[in-house]
């Protein structure tokens, strides 16, 4: 059987989840996945999967078997003619980026962090930003998983689009992914430009701004009256970014100096607004650079922090941002980390927070636990008021009834889940609470 550790103490990157599964497995191939599923059915154990653990969600928690995919991380094939790359589920996005760059290709869109395993990023609905671009799952051509019966299931967007759309954002509730085929594009550069805009002016010109480049996102340091606007446009021009700028801005200022200010601000939360004003008014300088796409998408390594993020109707953006600002002021929240706002085109994926809705994503972030429960609670009240849908890989506290109302295909996904996992092998407390109902008795059918 695969290597495993008994009573392995697991902690995620964000340090908000700690648990000790009975067994912690490191899987490296598909045959061992099937073998482990058979064992779990025989012993009536639950299975959950984890990659880097760069998630704040309790989707990974289990008392039974936790499977780590880090050794299941090979590139299987590159089809230059069809422009597809086939990989194993544990490969990290940064590894995909480097491999593709060497071959003259790239992923057409990425999120802000490249540390996640590709399977986990897809399963939880990870996204980048761009009003004409959908979440990362849209770049998949097909994927393979082993279901709760130990049967191989292949989901191909061309052969059965409806089935693919139902399953692609799956929360690890349908089975264990063993292979992923991604659509790729020729390598390209991004021309990055930044601008500080007044909060009210940004809200007034919101629709024009969010469509003003291929990729647009906002960074805001509350309670500052200015928002940093990032614009990325695709270009074939050669990179012009200097190594000194990368070191001074992306490492010294963005990592070390920023973490020092956060640490000082955490000594007294009343100092936090002052540091945010210092950052917005004095430390932020306009950026105008051209670099390889994946290097621009990937932001400097953030400090460990708490995070929740929700997707809303893109047309509610100005009103929502204004109300979020008023809520932070009224409740007296002292924020010590940027709040990120991004934009994603609607899609057809059943459990995508962007399902049939062009979306504005707003993330609430805080470094340290002091003040986080209150911010988290207040943000979710606002999020539900605007019919938001939470990011599956971040902290959220929704019951199944709310989510069922938010997702028109919720019952269709649940039906597929019950069909592919009849013994509820891949359930944990969160999955069970989301899809309600008592788990069925185990049946050893393998």
Image (cartoon, rainbow, N blue to C red):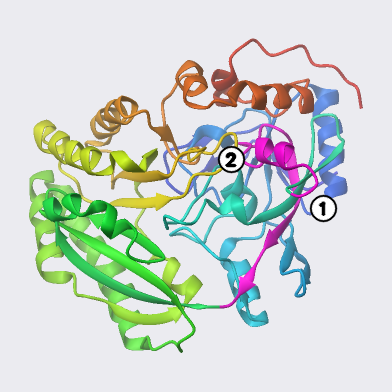
Task: Identify the mark nearer the N-term, 1 or 2.
Answer: 1
Query: How much space separates mark 1 and mark 2, taking CA atoms?
Result: 31 Å
Q: Is residue 200 above or below residue 383?
A: below
Q: Horizontal placement of 8 versus 244: left or right? A: right
Q: Horizontal placement of 121 versus 14: left or right? A: right
Which mark, by number, is residue 335?
Answer: none
Question: Can residue 218 be seen in the rendering of this structure?
Answer: no
Q: Nearer the viewer, residue 72 or 285?
A: 285
Quadrant where the N terminus is found in the figure: top right
How many numbered discs, if any? 2
Task: Return the x and y of residue 111 as percentages of the image width and height.
Answer: 47, 58
Which mark, by number, is residue 348?
Answer: 2
Q: Nearer the viewer, residue 137 or 6?
A: 137
Please identify the residue farthest to the front as the structure is shown.
Answer: 208
Residue under label 1, please give it: 29
Q: Are marks 1 and 2 in contact (CB under 8 Å)?
A: no
| Image quarter of residue 146 | top right
Residue at image position (45%, 39%) is 357
Residue at image position (32%, 51%) is 341
The magenta stretch spans residue 170 = yes
Quadrant where the C terminus is found in the figure: top right
Residue at image position (67%, 62%) is 183
Q: Which residues are magenta?
A: 158-187
Task: Return the x and y of residue 227 as percentages of the image width and height.
Answer: 19, 57
Question: Can residue 378 be seen in the rendering of this structure?
Answer: yes
Residue at image position (17%, 65%) is 196
Q: Nearer the viewer, residue 26 or 286?
A: 286
Q: Nearer the viewer, residue 73 or 390?
A: 390
């Amino acid at each position: 059987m695969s290597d495993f550790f008994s009573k392995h103490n697991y902690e995620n990157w964000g340090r908000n989840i700690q648990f000790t599964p009975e067994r912690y497995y490191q899987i490296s191939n598909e045959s061992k996945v099937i073998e482990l599923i058979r064992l779990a059915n025989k012993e009536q154990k639950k299975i959950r999967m984890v990659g880097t653990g760069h998630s704040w969600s309790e989707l990974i928690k289990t008392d039974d078997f936790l499977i780590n995919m880090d050794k299941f991380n090979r590139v299987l094939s590159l089809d230059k003619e069809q422009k597809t790359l086939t990989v194993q589920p544990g490969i990290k996005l940064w590894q995909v980026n480097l491999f593709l760059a060497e071959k003259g290709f790239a992923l057409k869109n990425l999120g802000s962090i490249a540390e996640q395993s590709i399977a986990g990023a897809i399963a939880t609905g990870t996204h980048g930003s761009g009003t004409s671009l959908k979440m990362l799952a849209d770049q998949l051509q097909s994927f393979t998983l082993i279901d709760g019966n130990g049967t191989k299931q292949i989901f191909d967007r061309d052969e059965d689009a409806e089935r693919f759309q139902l399953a692609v954002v799956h929360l690890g509730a349908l089975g264990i992914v063993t292979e992923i085929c991604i659509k790729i594009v020729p390598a390209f550069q991004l021309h990055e430009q930044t601008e500080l805009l007044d909060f009210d002016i940004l809200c007034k010109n919101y629709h024009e701004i969010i469509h003003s480049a291929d990729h647009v996102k906002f960074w805001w340091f509350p309670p500052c009256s200015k928002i940093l606007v990032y614009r990325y446009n695709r270009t074939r021009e050669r990179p012009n970014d200097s190594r000194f700028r990368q070191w001074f801005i992306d490492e010294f200022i963005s990592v070390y100096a920023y973490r020092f200010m956060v640490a000082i601000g955490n000594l007294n939360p009343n100092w936090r607004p002052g540091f945010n004003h210092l950052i917005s008014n004095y430390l932020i300088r306009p950026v105008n650079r051209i670099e390889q796409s994946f290097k621009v998408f990937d932001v400097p390594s953030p400090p460990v922090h708490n995070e929740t993020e929700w997707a809303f109707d893109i047309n509610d953006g100005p009103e929502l941002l204004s109300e979020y600002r008023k809520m932070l002021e009224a409740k007296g929240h002292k924020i010590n980390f940027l709040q990120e706002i991004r934009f994603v085109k609607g899609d057809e994926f059943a459990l995508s927070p962007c399902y049939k809705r062009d979306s504005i994503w707003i993330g609430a972030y805080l470094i340290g636990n002091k003040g986080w429960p209150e911010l988290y609670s207040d943000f979710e009240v606002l999020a539900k008021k605007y019919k938001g849908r939470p990011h599956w890989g971040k902290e959220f506290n929704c019951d199944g009834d709310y989510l069922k109302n938010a997702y028109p295909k919720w019952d269709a996904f649940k039906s597929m889940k019950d069909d592919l996992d009849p013994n509820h092998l891949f359930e944990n407390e969160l999955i069970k609470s989301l899809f309600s109902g008592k788990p069925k008795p185990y049946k050893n059918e393998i």
